[in-house]
Image (cartoon, helix red, strand yellow):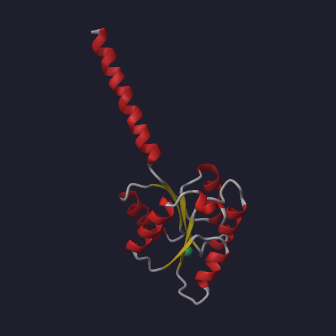
Amino acid sequence: MVMSTSKYLDAAERTQTLEHQENSKRKRILVVEDNQMGLMLLGQLLRAQGYDILQTSEGWGAIDLARDNHPDLILMDIELPDICGLDVTRLLKQDDQTKTIPIIALTAFAMPGDEERSLESGCDAYIAKPILMDKLLRAVESLLSSPPSAFDSL
Ligand code: MN
């Protein structure tokens, strides 16, 4: 009886350890988007791909979340209500705690120079809205699979 209880506990502990290992391998993405529908859709899409999602609709909130949780990647809407997403990116890239986190800019403007402005502010990639999901997922996977050293020089 004691044996079987202890075997059961061992098995439970092993299961918890495996679950913990699986969870710790999951990549966490911070989605910054003030359009609630867009935020919801991006969250659903990325969760369906197995990513853990943090989300906010505000720029200052994004800075707090990034510092506190150090996500593996950030999707950054440029047009935000409180502070421009490019300014949020500059602040994150100046901060030793957050500067290595890759950032993908999302913008509604398909204007000439917009991609350059995004990259100048420190974004690692740029995707114009309307977002093509295949393109977004490829960019996400590409940035997540790059070795961290690739970002040290940025
Ligand atoms: Mn917006």
Q: Quadrant of the N terminus?
A: top left
- Which residue lies most toward the bottom here? 112
- Which residue lies most toward the top here? 1
Percent of width and height locating residue 19: 39, 38
Q: Residue at x 62, y 77 (%)?
A: 118
Above or below residue 120? Residue 30 is above
Percent of width and height locating residue 91: 71, 64
Percent of width and height locating residue 109: 55, 84
Is residue 15 something that shows in the picture? Answer: yes
Percent of width and height locating residue 54: 51, 56
Question: Seen in the image, is 147 located left or right of residue 154?
Answer: left
Residue 121 location, quadrant: bottom right
State which image quarter holds ligand 1.
Answer: bottom right
Q: Residue at x 66, y 64 (%)?
A: 153
Q: Quadrant of the C terminus?
A: bottom right
Q: Residue at x 44, y 71 (%)?
A: 136
Question: Seen in the image, is 40 located left or right of residue 1?
Answer: right
Counting labels gives 0
Question: Seen in the image, is 34 located left or right of residue 46?
Answer: right
